[in-house]
Image (cartoon, rainbow, N blue to C red):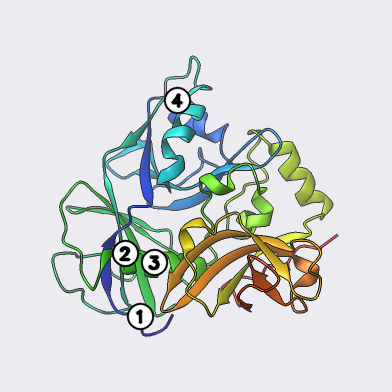
Amino acid sequence: MNNSPAFATPLADLSVLRATGADAADFLHGQLTQDIAGLPSGQARLAGYCTPKGRLLGTVVIWRDPANPADFVALIKADIAETLAKRLSMFILRAKAKLTVEPLAVWGVQLQAGETPAGPLAPPAGAAPWSVVRTDQGTWVSAPRADTGLQRWWLVTGQEIPAQGGQASELQAAWQAADIAAGLPWTQAATQDVFIPQTLNLDLIEGVNFTKGCYPGQEVVARSHYRGTIKRRMAYGVADSAESAASLAGSDIFDAARPESPSGRVVNAATHDGRTHLLLEVHLADLGTAEYRLGSVDGPHIGIQPLPYSIDTVEAG
C-alpha cells in the first residue's frame, strides 16, 4: 500500500472498553490470553478472550490508561463490544473491577513517515508500533503496518475532529485494508466461537502469552502450541473484484482444484481501490498450491500476498 495518501477518519466499526478498579489488572489477567499484569505503561498489546474450548469470542488491542495506569483501555469491534463486556462482567464476582463501553470516538490517522499532517491533528512522530502516547487530543496508539514507510495511529478521543482526505466510508475501508495487510485480525460477531488464537496468528504477533497462567481455554491453546499441531493459519489474500465486504466475515473460500468442500474461511474483509482485501483461515499445507476462490468454486480468484511476519514457523503436524 505504498504511496497511500495521508488521511484521518472516524472508525465507526471500533468501540472502546474500559476496565477500572483495584482488581482490574488481576481480573483481566485471568480472562485474556495476554500478560495483562505485566503490561508495561506506554505499550499496547493484542489479546484474545476465549471460550473454555479455546475459541475466540473477541480480540482486543489493550493498554494501560496513561492518565491512570491502574485502568485499562481496549479497542474492540463495535458489534461485539456490549455483549463481550456483559459476559466478562459475569465473572467479576467479588473482584473490585468494572467494565464499561466508553462513549469515545476512535479515529484512524495515516501519514507517510516524516510527513507533517495537515489540519488540526498532531500525532506523535516516529513511534514504533504498539506505542501509546497521551496528548491534549487524546490517546494515540501506534498501529502495526505492512508498509514501513507509513505511520498509522489509532486516536481515542472525546473531541470533535473533522475528517480529512476523502469520504469517511472510503477512508475507513482503506484503514481496514491496511489492518489486513499488516496481518492484524479482529474477531467480530460473524466469527465469534469459530477460531482458536493460533489459527488467527495471535501467537505469532505477541497476542498469546504461554507462561502467564490460566485463562478460559488456556489448556486447549497451550496443548496445540506445545504439541505442534497447528495445521491452519491466517493468510492475506486479495481478490481482483470489489465485493461487498460487509457480509464476508465467516464466509467460505474454496480451492478450485478441490471443489467438493470449503478450504477455509474469511476472517476479515475490506474493499479498497477496486479490490477485496481478505484475511483467510487456511490449511498451511495448501498454501502455494491451492487456487482459492471467494464464496464458491466459481467465485473471484484470491491471490495470496505476503504478510509482514512468517506464518510457517510452527510445524503443520
- Side of 236 relative to 28 (left or right): right
> Which comes sooner in the sequence, label 1 or label 3?
1
Nearer the viewer's eye, disc 1 or disc 3?
3
Question: In the structure shown, which secondary structural element does the residue marked by tag 4 occupy?
Answer: loop
For label 4, the residue is 23
Residues packed near mark 3 inside 10 Å, few (<14), some (14 to 19) or many (20 plus): many
Type of amino acid at the residue the image marks with label 2: Ser
CA gap, disc 2 to disc 3?
A: 6 Å
Residue position for label 3: 173
Relative placement, left or right, of 36 versus 263 is left
Which residue lies under the disc numbered 2?
A: 169
Q: Which secondary structure lies at badge 2?
A: helix
Q: How busy is the neighbourhood of tag 4: few (under 14 within 10 Å), some, or many (20 plus)?
A: some
Instruction: Name the image quarter holding the N terminus.
Output: bottom left
Q: Earlier in the sequence, mark 2 or mark 4?
A: 4
To which quarter of the image does residue 316 belong? bottom right
Amino acid type, callout 1: Ser
Q: Of the residues tagged 2 and 4, which is closer to the observer?
A: 2
The quadrant where residue 66 appears: top left
Q: Residue at x 44, y 77 (%)?
A: 148
Q: Is residue 247 above or below residue 221?
A: below
N-terminal of the pair, mark 1 or mark 2, is 1
